[in-house]
């Protein structure tokens, strides 16, 4: 048996109804949702199960909701099908999912993580006035050409940069709304198949998130992080990390740094990973992994929705 990596999704994977079947069928999963409700002081579980959708889509709600679903699914798997987790050697998460990866690896407790991502969502939302920032997915253009388009579209007053290197065919850009529009047009001129404006409320993983980064630094400095049971391949460096202090630093830096998902998956493969489980709502990461390295056998493994 080869080495298994546990992968955890980020924002965009949420949906109304997420986790209801897990809550109803698994006592360990139910305990995770109940703990989240208690820690946050409101019924996050009800928001996941019943909506309304517009409230679930708010960044400050989405982030703890996805983390909670992911850790509930992991708890259910550890209870009912622990054999699926045999050979776990690494964890990785996309953006917000890095917090789930840190919980899975024993770096963060679940209560600390759900508290942190709730504040992370608030800080990210507050960093940029509504409508001032934007994100767009660029499809079918090499990352180097996307980066060039961003440089061309940026100026003294408005900036745009690559935010998520999701697959060889998809790079997400983020920044001031006007600069994102200009960069999107430049990407189409350079041969991109599509440039899709994303329905998000802030330009995540761009330099505009610097205020949120500094506020997260204060919170993370006040939070205990243990050394990892197995390494976490981080978004910002695409390198395995196990020391708690190093992971604290990477969680701070990832707020306004790009998510290097392509490099992270390739690093997992280089470390001998040949199997991966996406644990949490949806199957976005499973699809991305297949586009990055077909040698890794990957499946979405959320259990009951």
Image (spheres, rainbow, N blue to C red):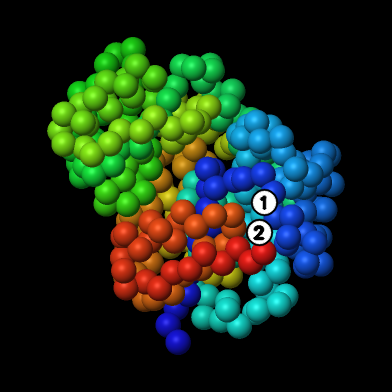
Asked whether, in this view, residue 46 is left or right of residue 164, the answer is right
Classify residue 55 by image quadrant: top right
Say few, some or many: other residues with alpha carbon within 10 Å of mark 2 (under 14 / 14 to 19 / 20 or more). Answer: some
Q: Is residue 277 above or below residue 97?
A: below
Looking at the rendered image, the quarter that the C terminus falls into is: bottom right
Looking at the rendered image, the quarter that the N terminus falls into is: bottom left
At mark 1, the secondary structure is: loop
Q: Do the residues labelled 2 and 1 touch (CB within 8 Å)?
A: yes
Q: Which residue lies furthest to the left in this view?
A: 190
- Residue 232 image point, x, y percent: 49, 61
Task: Please tell me which residue lies in front, 168 or 156.
Answer: 168
Task: Please tell me which residue lies in front, 288 or 220.
Answer: 288
Q: Is residue 5 above or below residue 10?
A: below
- Residue 214 image point, x, y percent: 54, 31
At mark 2, the secondary structure is: loop
Instruction: Residue 260: give its label.
Output: none
Mark 1 — residue? 18
Q: Earlier along the polypeptide chain: callout 2 or callout 1? A: 1
Residue 144 visible somewhere in the drawing:
yes
- Residue 78 image point, x, y percent: 68, 74
Classify residue 238 by image quadrant: bottom left
Instruction: Residue 305: give its label.
Output: 2
Classify residue 50 by image quadrant: top right
Task: Please tell me which residue lies in front, 192 or 11.
Answer: 192
- Residue 261 image point, x, y percent: 38, 52
- Give the residue displayed 45% in from the left and 56% down from the top: 285
Q: Residue furthest top?
A: 157
């Amino acid at each position: 048996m080869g080495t298994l990596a546990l992968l955890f999704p980020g924002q965009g994977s949420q949906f109304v109804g997420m986790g209801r079947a897990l809550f109803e069928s698994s006592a360990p999963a139910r305990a995770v949702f109940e703990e989240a409700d208690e820690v946050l002081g409101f019924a996050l579980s009800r928001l996941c199960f019943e909506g309304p959708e517009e409230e679930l889509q708010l960044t400050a709600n989405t982030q703890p909701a996805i983390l909670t679903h992911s850790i509930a699914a992991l708890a259910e798997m550890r209870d009912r099908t622990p054999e699926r987790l045999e050979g776990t050697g690494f964890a990785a998460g996309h953006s917000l999912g890095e917090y789930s990866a840190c919980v899975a690896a024993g770096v963060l407790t679940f209560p600390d993580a759900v508290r942190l991502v709730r504040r992370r969502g608030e800080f990210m939302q507050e960093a940029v006035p509504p409508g001032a920032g934007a994100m767009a997915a660029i499809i079918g253009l090499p990352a180097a050409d996307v980066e060039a388009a961003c440089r061309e579209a940026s100026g003294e007053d408005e900036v745009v940069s690559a935010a998520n290197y999701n697959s060889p065919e998809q790079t997400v850009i983020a920044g001031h709304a006007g600069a994102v529009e200009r960069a999107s047009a430049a990407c189409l001129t350079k041969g991109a198949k599509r440039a899709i404006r994303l329905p998000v409320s802030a330009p995540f993983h761009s330099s505009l998130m610097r205020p949120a980064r500094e506020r997260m630094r204060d919170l993370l400095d006040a939070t205990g992080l243990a050394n990892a049971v197995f390494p976490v391949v981080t978004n910002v460096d695409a390198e395995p990390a196990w020391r708690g202090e190093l992971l604290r630093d990477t969680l701070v830096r990832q707020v306004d740094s790009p998510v290097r998902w392509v490099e992270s998956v390739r690093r997992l493969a280089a470390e001998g990973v040949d199997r991966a489980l996406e644990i949490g709502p949806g199957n976005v990461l499973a699809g991305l992994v297949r586009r990055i390295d077909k040698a890794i056998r990957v499946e979405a493994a959320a259990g009951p929705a």
